[in-house]
Image (cartoon, rainbow, N blue to C red):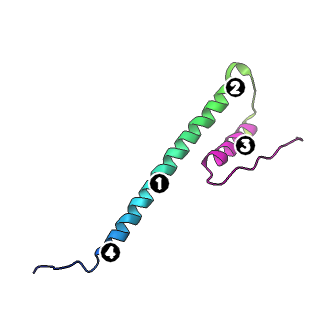
Amino acid sequence: MKLSHLAYASEIATSMLRKQQAEAVLQARKYLVENALTIVDNVLVHFEKDNKLNIDPGKKLEIINNLLVILTSDKEANPVINVGS
């Protein structure tokens, strides 16, 4: 039996394209997060080097969280100035 046309060709092509796009998005996000983690690590090493800044563990987690949110977000960051404790 010879097929003269593929009845589901457009659906198959659409499905394959979606899969490729999803894989590209996942790879881009992975790349973004890995580089954001490197940046955060470099910031902490910079400030902790030579005991320039002694950061308690709770504050360190807060800094890590804030930097990761800013670096990986697809929205513009709105800075908040903390003038109190």
Residue 15, located in which quarter of the rendered image?
bottom left
**Mark 4, other Cα within 10 Å: few <14 / some 14–19 / many ≥20:** few
Looking at the image, residue 17 sits to the left or right of residue 41; the answer is left
5 versus 45 height, above or below: below
| Identity of the residue drawn at 61% across and 54% down | 74
Looking at the picture, tell me which residue is in the foreground, 80 or 40.
80
Q: Which residue is mark 2?
A: 48
Looking at the image, residue 85 sits to the left or right of residue 43; the answer is right
Secondary structure beneath dot 4 equals helix
Q: Which residue is mark 1?
A: 26
Secondary structure beneath dot 3 equals helix
| Identity of the residue drawn at 51% across and 50% down | 29
Which quadrant is the N terminus positioned in? bottom left
Looking at the picture, tell me which residue is in the foreground, 68 or 80.
80
79 versus 51 height, above or below: below
The nearer-to-camera label among 2 and 1 is 1
**Where is residue 39 drawn, in percent x and y?**
60, 36
Q: Which residue is mark 3?
A: 62
Say whether disc 3 or disc 4 marks the residue closer to the N-terminus.
4
**Residues at discs 1 and 4 in contact (Cβ within 8 Å):** no
Say whether disc 2 or disc 1 marks the residue closer to the N-terminus.
1
**Where is residue 36 drawn, in percent x and y?**
58, 41
Say whether disc 1 or disc 4 marks the residue closer to the N-terminus.
4
User: Looking at the rendered structure, which numbered label has been put on residue 10?
Assistant: 4
| Callout 2 amino acid | Glu
CA distance separating discs 2 and 1: 33 Å
Q: Residue furthest top?
A: 50
Q: Which residues are magenta?
A: 59-85
**Mark 3, other Cα within 10 Å: few <14 / some 14–19 / many ≥20:** few
Which quadrant is the C terminus positioned in? top right
CA distance separating discs 1 and 4: 24 Å
